[in-house]
Image: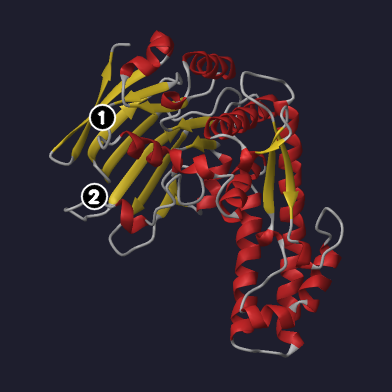
Amino acid sequence: MSEGGGADRVGALALSHFRSHRRTRLTFDGRPVAIHGPNGAGKTNLLEAVSLLSPGRGMRRAAAEEIIRRPEAIGWRIAAAIRDHEIELRAEPGQPRTTRIDGKAAPQVALARLLRVLWLVPSMDRLWLEGAEGRRRFLDRVTLSFLPDHAEGVLAYEKAMRDRNRLLKDGVRDPHWYEALEVQMATHGAAIDARRRDALTRLEAAQEEGGPFPTAALALTRPEEDGVTGAALDEAALRDALAGSRGRDMAAGRTLVGPHRADLAGTYAAKGIEARLCSTGEQKALLISLILANARALRAETESAPVLLLDEVAAHLDADRRAALYSELRMLGAQAFLTGTEPDLFAELGANALHLCVTENDGESHTEEVAP
């Protein structure tokens, strides 16, 4: 959780050889940040840098090597001021990303206790149409925003599962090799399931507050063949299901039972239509509704609104819904980073936002503050 009251916010951001940004230094005052410029100028790269101030691979899920600016390829660096803390992320060619908080090496999961970051990017527009993995990832980001320990539990579960999968692929049949791993998987798996359900309860309660965007009814589902009865994953039942599934899992070469097989089902509540069957505009509106509900719930529980990264969202809204979004951001008091190709998209924000223009010249991004 964030320390103290007020909104989560980034006070300053410095990039070195980060994608198209050779040298970029920015300071913020907590207002929304409206970023405009032509396609390919480097707007989204700024949002990606902020997204990396939270655990994981950021909103693009890019490997450290992919982020290095070319052709120099000398490694990249992000430095940020978050309240009273100095954060530094760095990656050298061929090396994994490193994290330092106040000058000391730290695990990525430690970032979750300093800053909550939520994002909505164009790649998420197909959330309801593609595979369950993306929806699980979305739900885990929501869960992490409420419960920072969720990241450590997921990592522990996935490590035990990788070890079990290795045994399956090697054709190991001795039950003693599996038992300890399955105990770990059952313990962490039941906790993951419980935290996800807790997050969904909070999210649905925040949606009931109303707002300009449609409400999504949400449910956590599992494959019927997973062998675990009941809605929630019980630790003992999951342990028994894992033991009973060894033969089937060995044939598949992977674990077929557990929270890594869960899915998030969504329904447009007012119409009773599954989200996957809704129009493109309705699906986008449902996503915005969920992100705003997540932010409202966090603010209500901690008196601190999260940082919001909204990439190219305004361009896909009509004037009324765009105005409603900006009004919601003002009420939340959130530091939101918004991108768009035209400054007119953010005209209504006026002096209530910091306005930045990003341009590109010879493959290098340049950012400057402009008048609203």
Q: Residues within 10 Å of mark 1 (few under 14, many from 20)?
A: some
Please identify the quadrant where the C terminus is shown. Answer: top left
Q: Residue at x 31, y 36 (%)?
A: 14
Determine which quarter of the picture holds residue 183.
Answer: bottom right
Q: Which residue is mark 2?
A: 69
Determine which quarter of the picture holds residue 215.
Answer: top right
Q: Is residue 170 above or below residue 54?
A: below
Q: Which residue is mark 1?
A: 38
Mark number, residue 290 = none
Label 1 secondary element = loop
Q: Position of residue 294 (x, y in %)?
A: 63, 32
**Circle 2 or circle 1, nearest the eye:** 1
Identity of the residue furthest to the left in this view = 362
Q: Which is nearer the eye, 258 or 164?
A: 258
Res. 155 visible in picture: yes
Q: Is residue 218 above or below residue 353?
A: below
- Tell me the CA gap for discs 2 and 1: 20 Å
Please identify the quadrant where the N terminus is shown. Answer: top right
Q: Position of residue 97 (x, y in %)?
A: 39, 56
Q: Is residue 114 above or below residue 241?
A: above
Mark 1 residue type: Pro
User: Would residue 336 appear left or right of 6 to someone viewing this image?
Assistant: left
